[in-house]
Image (cartoon, coloured by chain):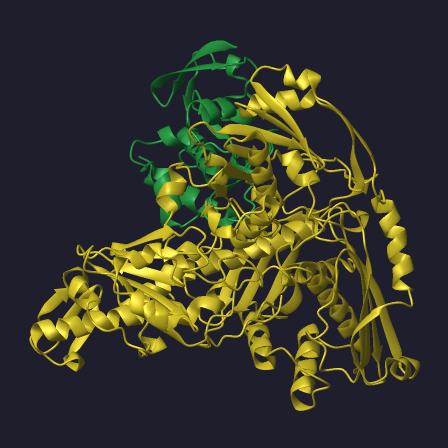
Chain colours: A yellow, B green
Amino acid sequence: MEPVSLKTTRRDFIKLAAATTGGLFLGFQWGETGAAAMAAGADADVLLKNIDFNSYLSIATDGIVTIASPNPELGQNIMTSFPMIVAEELDADWSKVTIIQAPLDTKRFERQLTGGSGAIPHSWERLRKAGATARHMLVEAAAKRLNVSATKLTTHEGMVIHTDSGRKLSYGDLATEASALPVPAEVPLKDKKDFTIIGKPIRNVENKNILTGKPLFGLDVYREGMLQAMIQRPPAFGTKIKSVDATAAKAMPGIIDVVTFKNNVAIVGKSTWQINKARKALKVEYEADGAIESTADHDKLFKALLNSNTATVRRQDGNVDTAFAQAAKVVRAEYQCPFLSHSPLEPMNFFAHVRADGVELVGPSQTPDAARNEVARLLGIAPDKITLELTRLGGGFGRRLKTDYAVEAAELSSLIKAPVKVTWTREDDMLGGSYRPAVRYRFEAALDAKGNMVGYKLRGVGINAGNCTREDNFPSGAIDNLLIDTVEHKSPITTGAWRAPITNFLAFAEQAFLDEVAEAAGKDPITFRLDLLERAKQKPVGAVKYDIDRMKGVITLAAEKAQWGKKKGIFQGFSVYFSHRSYVAQIAEVAKKDGQPVLQKIHVAADCGIVVNLSGAYQQVRGGVVDGLGHAMFGKLTFKDGAAEQKNFTAYRLIRFKEVPEIDVHFVNNGIDPTGLGEPALPPTGGAVANAIHKATGVRLYDQPFAGKEEIKGIRLGERM
Amino acid sequence: MASYKLQINNRSYEADVEADTPLLWVLRDHLGLVGTKYGCGVAQCGACTVHLNGNAVRSCTIPVSAIGQSKVTTIEGLSEHGDHPVQQAWDEIDVPQCGYCQAGQIMSAAALLAKKPKPTAAEIDTAMNGNLCRCGTYHRIREAIVSASTKLK
């Protein structure tokens, strides 16, 4: 993912509606359409006219502030943290803030997607301005009413206060008058030290609904007249339908139709269980339509690709050939990871109703705009004929960046001319593709006689992995002679972004390798990295595209909190990684119990800039570490003849309750604008754990998953001593 | 197809379904009780956990014909106002991330605490190990169970 500029463009705030409904309704927008929108803004009808708005808040006369949260919510807690930013600058009374999930609306919102840990960094300034603009207008309205200067007024928890007299006016009381005032072009933002909401632990605004089982998710969508469907897709990649015999399936109770389109056979009926049963009566034959691959083939292929002479060079500094020829010592290691399934706990699903006059889509998507555009293309209609209502997402992890499951629902609805919800079973989900790609890396380091790393080579080879390196990440910039290149194998097995794409494994390989190099150089792993960072700062080699001081900051904080190297009987492993604009260092601690290693604790130091919601952020980091640990330990999807061999959680192992070690999280408090937190805590975990295991046992781990390896078969996770 | 009379959340329901229909799909497709979630269909993830006569069970693998007179409790019926001590603790500790697994987690925890109001760490491990949380909220689930156990009379 490319870095997102933290600078935002100029924007103007406009009033959308006021007099007709009472209260204050603010939209904001930027760019060239501002003037036209401003002219129309006095009329309540603008809401219906698709003016190019980007977000909004409204204040009702009873003081209730309604804030729309436009981005898909999948557990990153955006529905709570976005409104906190608006409410902060508004000086709202948080107990009177109501939050709604906005539907897809590209006229009003921008970047209505969840991915790349980018929502808060992208929207930080505009959300603050949304709140500050409304606050400014409320203060102006109070100044007029009280006939005092606005400079004599302050705001606090939904009230404008005249400091001299102590008189107070509520936002609800002022909303209608405020909405009649001109919208300021520029408003001052709060000094960050005055924040009263941002930085506090605020509970998830949907807790009550979640904890009482309210219908929030895509699978919970049931509509009048809605049919249910499951789709039989090719079980193996590289195959297509040869023949379909649906006679028996069609005769099953509750089955309305069996429809074949593209490589799909859809069973349409009235209830999930009936279509699931009928599906088993389908007779579908498949034939080859491309390469039929197995994991055993990939293992051989990787070895060949590592020696390929057709690699794409990603970064080159100095001359590695000379450096390695003159090296006093060379360290080499190879690391490999398997494919992974995203496995959000809510399987893929979507509701679609294609009518003559338009299309209604409802469901969980990380990229609703892309889903709508693809449905529009498929059906040959304009995107504005399609509405897309976002449900809560029962996890995403990147799987719901793909639009396949929404598009197929729309296609099926258009074919059967009925509203339909398509449900994927867990098996469909696991066999259905878009996996974290399998990758193998070869790292090589050249050390001089003093143990300085003077040469560094990284070759990454992957299956549909694109550029499986991050060539400008640390340690690039700190090494005179460096070569990073990649080779990609194209396969019918589909891959996609999986939480912290590429870095979810690359970080482990790199940080485990650097540990090994530090050992070869006779240096402490942390000192080794700090020395490299100092080198990159004092005498950078080529471009340095990471923030050296921020990286040093998390390293220092983690070392301090974990008392690095000072604990008796505890074997510590270190790892640090920069991804998605943020920095995270981790120290894993392994103890020995009955002679066997027990992973007890992971200390985390994170620099994501300002923490918006301390409760959400803390759990986001801890959850990321659990995710990183779980997949490093257990995650494995293998292929036989083009088909995934693990089809459900019986064989596809996820980390469980009693396996999580204690995880302590510390944030660097440096006051910089937020830089993202959905992904950055995950990548460092595998490296920290592997390095701690090495300290405790002498065993170096090179491949994931770690579990099941003979040399660490006695390892236990999370066990209390 | 047959008609089944079910006692769910202290109410009587009737469902006209096939005998092998799992309780999960009767709840979701036929009775509109969608708080109980589908996650795997093979009793591996715990998202579909409900109480059957007070015991935590996986509703995805129990056919409706096996329910008989047993009393079923789903997340919708755990408390009248969403204020069961476990639900309260879940809110106070701010457990949910995506929230999809949490109904099942809560039902497992509530069944545990009904039997063992002061569970040991090992008893919590055993009771909760069948419930997957893909977001990794396990630490807070444990904290919330401990917190809820202090709220029980």
Q: Residue at x 51, y 25 (%)?
A: B25
Q: Is residue A360 left or right of residue A189?
A: right
User: Is any atom of residue B20 visible in this view?
Assistant: yes
User: Among all residues in the image, which is located at the extreme top?
Assistant: B2
Q: Is residue A104 above or below residue A12?
A: above
Q: Is residue A180 above or below residue A428?
A: below
Q: For residue A319, which quarter of the picture?
A: bottom right
Q: Is residue A692 above or below residue B41?
A: below
Q: Locate residue A704, reporting x and y percent.
A: 75, 53
Q: Locate residue A540, reporting x and y percent.
A: 69, 87
User: Is any atom of residue B116 visible in this view?
Assistant: no
Closer-to-camera residue (A451/A492): A492
Q: Is residue A184 left or right of residue A546?
A: left
Closer-to-camera residue (A628/A458): A458
Q: Residue at x 40, y 44 (%)?
A: B90
Q: Locate residue A677, reporting x and y percent.
A: 52, 63
Q: For residue A35, which quarter of the picture?
A: bottom left
Total marks shown come to 0
| Quadrant housing the N terminus of chain A | bottom right
Q: Locate residue A438, reporting x and y percent.
A: 76, 53
Q: For residue A565, which quarter of the picture?
A: bottom right
